[in-house]
Image (spheres, helix red, strand yellow):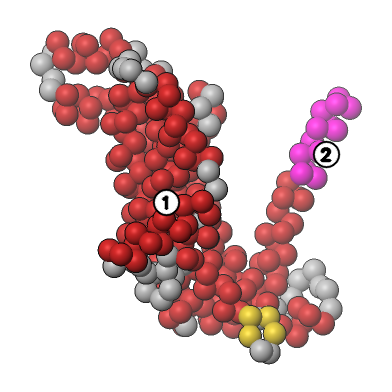
Amino acid sequence: MIRQNFSRIFLVAFLALSLLPIYWMLNMSLKTNEEIVGVMTMWPRELTFNNYITIFTDEAWYGGYINSIIYVALNMVMAVLLALPAAYAFSRYSFLGDKHLFFWLLTNRMTPPAVFLLPFFQLYSTFGMMDTHIAVALAHLLFNVPLAVWILEGFMSGIPKEIDETAYIDGYSFPAFFVKIFLPLIKSGIGVTAFFCFMFSWVELLLARTLTSVNAKPIAATMTRTVSAAGMDWGVLAAAGTLTIVPGALVIWFVRHYIAKGFAMGRV
């Protein structure tokens, strides 16, 4: 009994400490700058929604969210589509250097984005792709495709090869088998993969900020606009930070069951 009570207290304390920064950011977003820098309060004394109104009425602010969602969605779709055939090949076939190639893919994921910053900048400047959504989406593929292949390969390896052989005996072509039979069997893996691709692309700042300037500028880079000669606009910055949590929370809500299955299979 004592051990159970201790575990509950620990979990409650951990949950409270985890949610405290989110609550404090939400609390600041509903205050004026004068109240934020004047005195510390646990809740707003003068409740205001002007910070959120500023974000939803200023094109520079809400445009940053739109830009981020566009290139993140592009990257997520392309990463999954590219990783599916590669993961199937790694899970079903043995070929010369397959283990080395698989490890090389993971080394790209372990490399800091700053290493590839200059090559991307020069390539995109040469081909006129700077400040475009597709430029950031393609740059993020270098990191998300290896992760997607690694996750999907684990889910595919858990599907018996006899299913493939049975489908071919029944007269299914490979495209029909892959779309109608195989993909539904690994939909949990696809959901987990899409989630992790979304999270990396959504929070990555260095490449997204360097490869864009105006037309595709992400919200993370737009948040630097809060610094001015008058000081830091803490309220607007807190409101922007609160809104950046919403897309990630929605994605987690929709794929929560798939993530649980991914942990159960030991691939997440």
Q: Is residue 117 magenta?
A: no
Residue at x-position 53% and y-position 43%: 111
Q: Which residue is mark 2?
A: 9
Q: Is residue 169 left or right of residue 84?
A: left
Residue 60 appears at what percent x and percent y?
Answer: 46, 79
Can residue 189 be seen by looking at this rendering?
no
Q: Which residues are magenta?
A: 1-14
Q: Secondary structure at mark 2?
A: helix
Name the residue tied to disc 1: 140
- Distance from disc 1 to disc 2, alpha carbons, whole Å, reads 41 Å
Dot 2: few (<14), some (14–19), or many (≥20) neighbours within 10 Å? few
What is the x, y in percent for residue 215? 37, 74
Tell me what residue is drawn at x 14 percent, y 10 percent: 169
- In the image, is residue 233 above or below residue 163? below
The dominant secondary structure in magenta is helix
Check disc 2 and give the amino acid type.
Ile
Answer with left or right where residue 226 lies relative to residue 176: right
Q: Secondary structure at mark 1?
A: helix
Residue 42 place in picture, x, y as percent:
80, 68
Give whichever of 44, 18 is nearer the camera. 18
Q: Quadrant of residue 28?
A: bottom right
**Picture quarter with the N terminus:** top right
Q: Is residue 100 visible?
A: yes
Residue 157 location, x and y as percent? 39, 19
The single residue placed furthest to the bottom in the displayed view is 230
